[in-house]
Amino acid sequence: MNLIGRYVFRETLGAWLAVTLVLFVILMTNQFAEILDDAAADLLPRDAVFAVLALTSLRYVTVLTPIGFFLGIMLALARLNRDSEMAAMAACGVGPARLLVPITLLATILAAGLAWLALVKTPDASRQIEMIRTQAAEELQLGVLEAGQFTTPDSGDTVIYAREVVDTEIRDVFVEHEDRDRVVVILADRGRRVQDSSGGVSFVFYDGRRYEGRPGTRDFRIVDFGEHGIPVQRRDVEAESIPVEIKPSEQLWRSSDPLDQAELQARISGPLSLFALMLLAVPLSRSRPREGRFARLGVGMLIYIIYANTLAIARLWVERGDVPTWLGLWWVHGLLGIVGLTLLARETGALTRIRTADPVLAGT
């Protein structure tokens, strides 16, 4: 890469970093406030606030990189236009097409990093966030034992009533626990919740009586005990519906479910969008002599909003099965690429040369 190419590469990289950083700070400030609200409402462990914030930042980097790259190219090349550096480059034979060389190199580097984030790290971060929130919900459910109220600490198999709650100890306890086809009723003077190193939770009761039997029969057993424990069965996470956002990309690739295919194509769309937006940003950044630096920025933002919403609509069509998965979201990138190539060809004069070379077009 020559001197001009390195210069354009450096300018575009700096503009991309600046735009992405500003957008990142704005979004993360709002996200930090939401995470603090969840922690205040006991929906999230307080010691996990910064861990969740860091994991969430990966998702925002994945989302912001394309728009930051698009705006970065427009701002960098618009500055070169304003300072007449583009005119000097054009006099040396460096046109818009030559500018694509360093910008394409930068887009390739960013696309490789974005593909790694979108396909590997972001789903893994989403899974960790889901695990933290699920564990917090379970801990909250297990930890809420109020005096004079019936509490279900698991999926509904166990009901606990305590007349008095003192710190982690419950007193004058009534427990009903379903064990397959048998019902266990426990009356105890006191009890407490115990959690082992593997995360398993159980309740230990002291000085009480256990009644066990089948309802409707005389098959009952009564046992007095000094200490007795009952494990709490947590929810079966595997049996629940797994959000598509946390599924590994390998699993999505092997699946034929339209929801999984739509998610996989959305993850791949990030790196692909860099190249489609690059083709559009170069011709849009070229301004007339009396136009300001940000004259075309509004047009660029409008096109990006239309592009992003069209991707969202195309994804919905794939999820509903309205379009085949082989068409999926790819047509949106292809359409934007064609628009960018057309504008770039007009900017470089390629369309004029084609019309001049074609007798039919020249006659028209």
Image (spheres, rainbow, N blue to C red):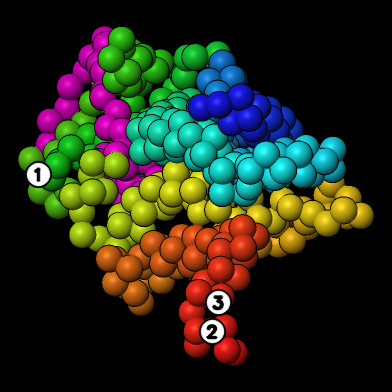
> Badge 1, how many Cα within 10 Å: few under 14, some, many 20+?
few
x 49%, y 48%: residue: 275
Amino acid tagged 3: Arg
Residue 164 falls inside the magenta stretch: no
Residue 316 or residue 295, whichever sits in front? 295
State which region is magenta: 220-248
* Residue positioned most to the left: 219
Residue count near mark 3 (Cα–Cα under 10 Å), binned few <14, some 14–19, many ≥20: some
Residue 65 appears in the picture as rendered: yes
Q: Are marks 2 and 3 in contact (CB under 8 Å)?
A: yes
Specify the label residue 355 is tagged with: 3
Q: Nearer the viewer, residue 137 or 278?
A: 278
Callout 3 secondary element: helix
Instruction: Name the foreground residue: 8 vs 64.
Output: 8
| x, y percent for residue 17 | 66, 29
Distance of mark 2 from mark 3, alpha carbons?
5 Å
Q: Given the image, on which type of amino acid does mark 2 rest?
A: Leu
Residue holding disc 1:
218
Label whose residue precedes the other's in the sequence (2 or 1)? 1
The answer to whether one can see residue 312 in this image is no
Disc number for residue 361: 2
Q: Earlier in the sequence, mark 2 or mark 3?
A: 3
Residue at 38% over, 48% down: 268
Is 226 inside the magenta-drawn segment? yes
Q: Position of residue 353 (x, y in %)?
A: 56, 68
The answer to whether 167 appears left or right of 182 in the picture is right
Q: Is residue 117 above or below residue 97?
A: above
Q: Which quadrant of the structure image shows residue 249? A: top left
What's the residue type where badge 1 is placed?
Arg
